[in-house]
Image (cartoon, grey):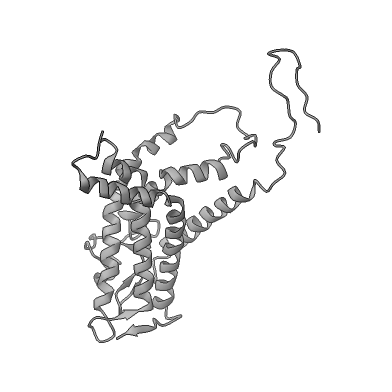
Amino acid sequence: MTPTHDARPGGGRARLSQRTLRTDRWWLGPTLTTLGLATFLVYGAARVFQQDHYWVQEHHYLTPFYSPCLAQQCVPDASLLGRLPWEFPPILPYALLSLPILLLFRVTCYYYRKAYYRSVWQAPTACAVREPHRTYTGETRPLMLPQNGHRYFFYFAGAIVLVNTWDMIVPFFHGTDGGFGVGVGNLVMLTNVVLLWCYTFGCHSCRHIMGGRLRSFGGRPVRYWLWSRASALNDRHMLFGWLSIASLIATDAYVALVASGTITDPRILN
């Protein structure tokens, strides 16, 4: 359809009946993003509220979806920070402390905001594609104001990554005979923790903490080194965001399969 417009000076912009004149597959990226985020949320919710198959006693594998395990129902050895003196109802996840923080950290992340703004809210879906919204309000509405708390969620998320790191280290000292050992599960958990560190410390807030308020790095070689490392990770923030989501699902699925007896954990050492 041919666009129409007012030819007079100042007559206004062309009026197009089509949403876009683009002929490429501009919808593919937003569609894949929506499917990826939905897969993570659905899988995570299903596992969190399953409240089972989260701990492998023999090798001390604990899935990150249940760490730290706080409910009275938690296996004692799986409770790094101890257990609360009451049982959680099915509507509460065992990792009640960490999951809301990690969810808020991801939801308010600058990359993920761009991802779901474009794919889910379609604001905008893609360049040169008309969005379905009549007005633009930015992040001024009440439900959007918590986005400004991202830098605070970063501090708590960093503490939880430390907990995940401890959860990863402990199993190395619970081999088959109780000593040092390495199994496939150890490598899976190690990979997950490395990716979580790369994602968390590639965060824009972390980069700002390292050097955002400085006028010059002169005389501050340590902060410059930290800022440079955070900047290098920040360049790949999207990549580590998706890889860490995939590793969380893979780690949880592996622990669940071993804990349920579906598979055994192949041992590399001891």
Number of numbered discs present?
0
Q: Locate residue 257: give its quadrant.
A: bottom left
Q: Is residue 121 above or below residue 85?
A: above
Can the viewer see residue 70? Answer: no
- Residue 161 or residue 90, whichever sits in front: 161
Say if 129 sits above or below 159 in the image: above
Percent across and percent down for residue 225 are 26, 49
Measuring from the top left, give residue 236's x and y in whole percent: 43, 52
Name the residue at 70% across, 37% down. Answer: 20
Quadrant location of the N terminus in the rendered image: top right
Quadrant location of the C terminus? Answer: bottom left
Considering every residue shown, the one lying at the far top of the view is 9
Residue extending farthest to the right is 1
Extreme-front residue of the structure? 218
Q: Is residue 133 visible?
A: yes
Q: Is residue 64 left or right of residue 46?
A: left
Choose top left, top right, bottom left or bottom right for residue 79: bottom left
Vertical relation: 142 (above or below) 46 = above
Which residue is at a point 18% across and 41% down the rendered structure image? 219
Nearer the observer, 9 or 215: 215
Determine the residue positioned at 56% across, 51% down. Answer: 34
Q: Residue at x 75, y 21 (%)?
A: 5
Image x and y of residue 75, in percent: 28, 71
